[in-house]
Amino acid sequence: MGGLFGVVASGNCAKTLFYGVDYHSHLGTENAGLAVFGPGGFSNTIHRISQAQFKSRFVDDYQTMNGTRGIGAIDDESPQPLLIRSKFGTYALAATGLITNKDELAGKLLSDGASFNEMADGGVNSVELVAQLINRSASIVDGIVRVQQSIEGSVCLLLMTENGLYAARDRYGRFPLVIGRQSARSDSPAGHAVATESSAFLNLGYEQVRSLGPAEIVRLDAAGIHDEQPPGPDKQVCAFLWIYTGYPASAYEGVSVENARERCGQAMARGDDVEADFVTGVPDSGVGHAIGYAMESGLPFRRPLVKYTPGYGRSYTPPSQDIRDLVATMKLSAVRDVIKGNRMVICEDSIVRGTQLKNFTIRKLWDNGAREIHIRPACPPLMFPCRFASSTRTVSELAAHRAIRDLEGGDRGNGEEYLDHHSRKYAAMVEWIRRDLGVTSLTYLPIAEMIAAIGLPEEQLCLYCWRGR
């Protein structure tokens, strides 16, 4: 998915920028960068973070940076922010999301005489592609609108000029951008900030002002917040933000991530009659779901698995299976004295590929003497790869698809029948996944209960990875 952070201040913003970007480290593991504008003009620094944490790679850089405004990003696809020279002058640009028609757009631009200098894993850097679209427009705002209307997928962006900082949310608001204002209690330079995660404001002295609406564009400068394009009418926020992706201390559209996860857990417990000795969550995002389950069921919450936090991030985000497996192996440690002889409900945010859960979580529990393992994912089976962020990219990766392919003899058959959790085919798919995982029982949270736990109207949520539309 990636994360963005930008700041406009009355003094040097480099420290605020550094920590603001760092608070998005849970959203990516590959690339990160900072850019500032100050007395010396524009400067930027970009590093790979696949083998080191953000702080260790940038701690020396930010201490040499000096500017009254800055932007930064953590992203798995494209190194950024980029400095762009254009007819609008020089600007810094950061953009996160997924452009599914990138090759088509790049091909048209090349045929029109454009050239691309930045590459990302052998392909065109998506941030430079966004810059090319902007530069072919009459103004920066017109260019951002062109980006929103031209791309298939989803892109949020921050664009910093000598005169201000533009922030634009993606066309359907699938991913968040929130604005914060300097708190009167803060000792940081006065001003405003914009972030993907509202939790980035909490320890930096900012109070959340509001969320940007779908396709909304604002400009931040020393005078405040200026509206450049009003929100669009269509909102489809990624439901997975509340289930897994988002940070527990964040809120999107006014809905707390932690509260939503607790409600998911409560809903799972209400529909469950399993007998167990305790409930737990797969760290970290499964913990909130498990707390809700414990609250509703009365089962004690215990920790048979603990996460060794330093150096190990999410095992879902790295692009290669080898790296995902390594992180999954190393980050969780089993507590044998808690596990041995016990029946346990394991709350998980989701089952995507299922390989890490099977090979590195469930195996540790069985190897340490678990008596029964009951898996409870807080969302339905993921049926379709995401078209709007760099996460699952092919149908064949998904555990549900492997089940369907085996049950249908290699043909996906009528996929619609597997979406109905009351159907026999759905039950057969879940049973296949249960056997493949090697657990005592497996029950997913139905989609209607997941939507109710989030608390937004269904039509305002993107449910593509469950429904394919």
Image: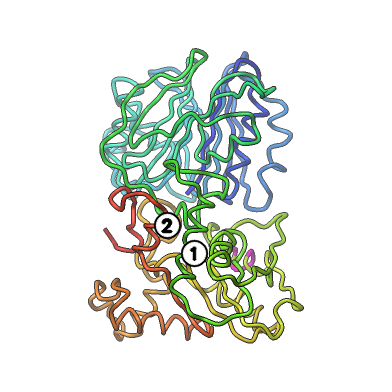
Q: Quadrant of residue 192?
A: top right
Query: What label sits on residue 341 in the rendered view?
Result: none
Q: Position of residue 446 (x, y in %)?
A: 37, 68
Q: In the figure, 135 relative to 117: above or below?
A: above
Disc 1, disc 2: CB below 8 Å?
yes
* Number of marks: 2
Query: What label sits on residue 266 in the rendered view?
Result: 1
Identify the residue under disc 2.
453
Sequence-first tag of 1 and 2:
1
The secondary element bearing badge 1 is classed as helix
Can residue 220 be seen in the rendering of this structure?
yes
Callout 1 crowding tier (Cα within 10 Å): few <14, some 14–19, many ≥20: many
Can residue 103 be seen in the rendering of this structure?
no
Give the Cα distance between marks 1 and 2: 9 Å
Q: Amino acid at mark 1?
A: Gln
Q: In the figure, 115 relative to 77: above or below?
A: above
Residues in magenta, as a range: 323-327
Q: Position of residue 188 (x, y in %)?
A: 67, 23
